Amino acid sequence: MTHAPDILATSRLSNSTSLSSACWQPWLALLCTVLWMTPAAHGQMRADLPGNKAAAAGPKNLLAEAARSVGVKQCQPAINRLSALAISGTGAHDVLVDWDRAHPDKGPFFSLTGIEYAGASAAVSITAVPQDGGACSVSAERISIAPYSCKSIAETELKGYSATPLLPTFTVYVSPTEPGGSVSLVDSPPGCLIIRRYVQYNWTEQTKMSVPAHK
């Protein structure tokens, strides 16, 4: 059984910026331009990474670039780490971020990343909240669907995990070897919805992230 690689990572939104990366066709030397648009509703930014450029050079870390460009500093290392794990092995990705425009380095940073593999795709949500003393609280969730039953996935890939049924069709699995992490399987016949979740408080650059291993 083969699945795409996994990871496992209210402020006032006062402005909005949209970022798109549009590349010319390969026969036009892969020339790229960055287009900025500024709607007026809230602090939100979108970035595109075309598949042809990703295949040629590997995916750029658009989420890390987006956080840096809007003024995030304290939680930048945590965002770099989690987003790098999220896009590892992908062919293309696209990000949507929300932040407090008035206080970008003091308020929460929210993001949603669409990731694409060969023949598969997933969504990753990463949130970083700055804390006193230079630390950050972080949360990452990876959401995907597999064309297998949840029971078969649990039996083959989650051996040794403790299972807690929340609903008859919704079970959460945790392991003492992955503190802060969990895997939720939601029956979605004929497949299974997989939610990998990771949370850590008071993260600093010296903190070792106990991110759940790839499955």
Image: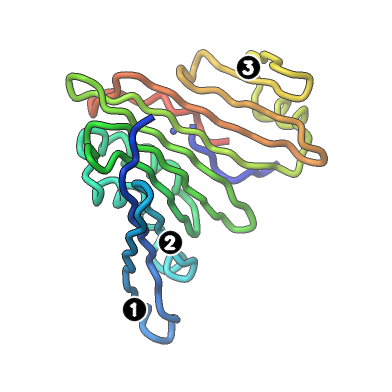
Q: Secondary structure at mark 1?
A: loop
Residue drawn at point x = 34 percent, y = 52 percent: 16
Residue 139 sits above or below residue 29 on the image: above
Q: Read off the residue under disc 2.
A: 48
Of residues 53 and 169, the one drawn nearer to the viewer in this rendering? 169
Check residue 160 in the rendering and tell me which mark sits there, or answer none. Answer: 3
Q: Amino acid at mark 3?
A: Gly
Please, is residue 54 above or below residue 67 in the view? below
Given the current orientation, which residue lies at the most extreme front position? 40
Label 3 – label 1 distance at C-alpha: 50 Å
In this view, the residue in front, 78 or 5, is 78
- Please report whichever mark, 3 or 1, sits nearer to the chain's N-terminal start: 1
Q: Residue at x 41, y 56 (%)?
A: 46
The quadrant of the image that shows the N terminus is: top right
Type of amino acid under label 2: Asp
Q: Residue furthest bottom?
A: 27
The residue indicated by pointer 1 is 31
- In terms of image quadrants, where is residue 17? bottom left
Could you tell me which residue is drawn at 53 percent across and 39 percent down?
6
Q: Position of residue 51 (x, y in %)?
A: 49, 66
**Do callouts 2 and 3 mark residues in contact (Cβ within 8 Å)?**
no
Image side of residue 60 versus residue 165, left or right: left
Q: In the shown orientation, is residue 130 left or right of residue 112?
A: left
| Vertical arrangement, residue 190 with respect to residue 169, above or below | below
